[in-house]
Image (cartoon, rainbow, N blue to C red):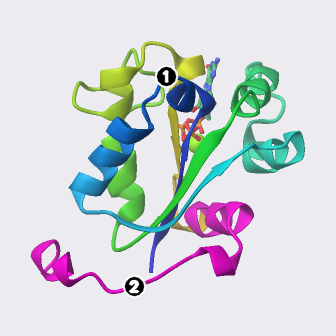
Amino acid sequence: MEKSLIILKPDAVQRGLIGPILTRLEARGLKFIGIKLSQVSSELAHKHYGVHEGKPFFAGLVSYITSGPVLVVAVEGKDVIEIVRSTVGATNPVKAAPGTIRGDFGVNIGRNLIHASDSPENGEHEVALFFSSEELIRSERSVDQWITE
Ligand code: GTP
Ligand code: MG
């Protein structure tokens, strides 16, 4: 089953937006299989954002993601990559549509509140990078029949 790693970045935690952001993800019908507060190490930040190494914003990105506690969330389900990315909105909050998390809560690309995996392969890889298998909990929800046919 498809997985996505979501990170509520340090600005979201500091601004008291954990509740409002999780509310949106939960209300959409997403199934959480892991949630924890975490302090991202420089080593983990380099692994997670390794694809951006060498870009002009890389040092700032590592400093941003390691600057304070984050809330790490794993979700699982059909099409979750696309569903989460569309709920999150465009990378640059200036361009993000109203109604998306970045479009409603952000104004700056360097403080865009939330990360979401961008492919099923990266979702699988990133969830494994941030969670041990014991930390992932799968259970049936009786409401699932009212969320997907
Ligand atoms: P993530 O979900 O965080 O991976 O964002 P994304 O997939 O929408 O964008 P991308 O992977 O291309 O970039 C990763 C992160 O780097 C972004 O979320 C931003 O925080 C940051 N970033 C990307 N481009 C820029 C930029 O031009 N300037 C700055 N300051 N930060 C950038
Ligand atoms: Mg990305």
On whether ligand 1 comes within 8 Å of the CB at mark 1, the answer is no
Range of the magenta residues? Answer: 122-149
Q: Is residue 88 visible?
A: no
Residue type pointed to by label 1: Arg
Identity of the residue drawn at 56% across and 25% down: 14
Quadrant housing the N terminus: bottom left
- The percent coordinates of residue 134 (x first, y second) are 66, 80
Q: Is residue 128 left or right of residue 99?
A: right
Q: Is residue 103 magenta?
A: no
Q: Is residue 9 left or right of residue 42?
A: left
Q: Disc number at residue 139?
A: 2
**Residue 79, quarter of picture:** bottom left
Label 2: few (<14), some (14–19) or many (≥20) C-alpha neighbours in 10 Å:
few
Quadrant housing the C terminus: bottom left
Dominant secondary-structure state across the stretch colored magenta:
helix
Q: Is residue 14 visible?
A: yes
Q: Disc number at residue 15?
A: 1
Residue most extreme to the right: 43
